[in-house]
Image (cartoon, rainbow, N blue to C red):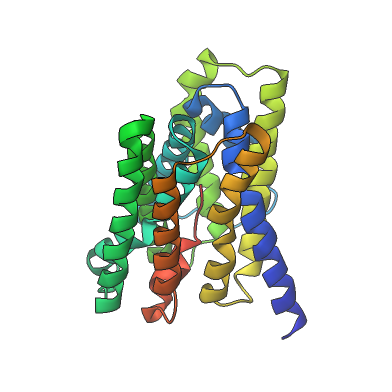
Amino acid sequence: MNKDKKKSIVFIFFTAVLWSTGGMLIKLVNLNPIAIAGYRSIFAALLISFFIRRSAFRFSWNKVLGAISYTAMVILFVSATKATTAASAILLQYTSPVYIAILGGWLLKEKATVKDWVVIFFVIIGMVLFFMDDISSGSLKGNILAVLSGVAMALNAIFMRREKDADPLENVFWGCILTILVAIPFMVKYVPDINGWAGIGLLGIFQLGLPYILYAKAIKHITALQSTFLGLIEPLLSPVWVFLTIGELPGLMSVLGGVVVLTSVTIGCIKPKNHSASEMLQQQSS
């Protein structure tokens, strides 16, 4: 294993660990979720702006639609994390390969295989277990938002793949800018206190901006499959940080659903056709 590859694996590992703190920090910041998404994006955009390529901006619908889906993804994820458990929010977002497989044939001309549909079947079973838990926990709204964030995550990945020559950081940068614009009315109405600013700063710099910078450097030297497996550290660690800080525990059915979803996604990433699902899964996170 060469030096660049070793370094990239370390980068992806820390990327996943930093991403995994999102649920904890969102739970700790007492503020409207859309306002959180907007303020967080300010910090992330400022940091990322120092690392994006200084090339002339070239308009493309894939870039525009990618920014829109990115904005939907982050706003829905923050909203979901506020409305349900952090475990449910992140694990349901990681059902995105299901939507990639379904939409890929239309938007990417990459048809799902029989194996893909088997994985989708088991992921849907996992999702049903989550929603069975909601009958008693009252977090149905949060889980619906989490599922929608997974759809947005899949669309963001698809449009990034269609824009094959795009700089991943540029895509994230414009997504952050659009998020800020959408969130302005909420940011004006809901202003964080000192503790809130600290949490939002951590979210923007260390949970979003820095991980994307590390990811953009790492993905040049390791395979999509390796990045996917390392990236699965995020949904595993996210509930742990939330439990350690605020004592939040998901219900038994949600735990079972999470095991089914993560196992299915992992199996689905083994020898993926054209690397499609595994490559796109890591093109964005919450």
* Residue 264 spot, x, y in % from top left: 39, 66
Compared with 166, 1 (above or below) is: below
Name the residue located 35 percent from the left edge and 54 percent from the top edge: 155
Q: As drawn, is 257 to the left or to the right of 78?
A: left
- Nearer to the camera, 155 or 230: 230
Query: Residue 217: x and y, percent?
Result: 66, 65
Identify the residue at image location x=55%, y=69%. Answer: 229
The extreme front residue here reads 252
Res 183 visible: yes
Q: Residue 91, percent across and down?
A: 45, 51
Relative to 270, is 236 on the left or the right? right
- Asked if residue 62 is positioned above or below residue 240 in the image, the reply reads below
Number of numbered discs:
0
Residue at 58% across / 33% down in the picture?
26
In the picture shown, does residue 82 fall above or below 276?
Answer: above
Q: Is residue 117 above or below residue 60?
A: below
Counting from the top left corner in percent of width and height, residue 231 is at 56, 62
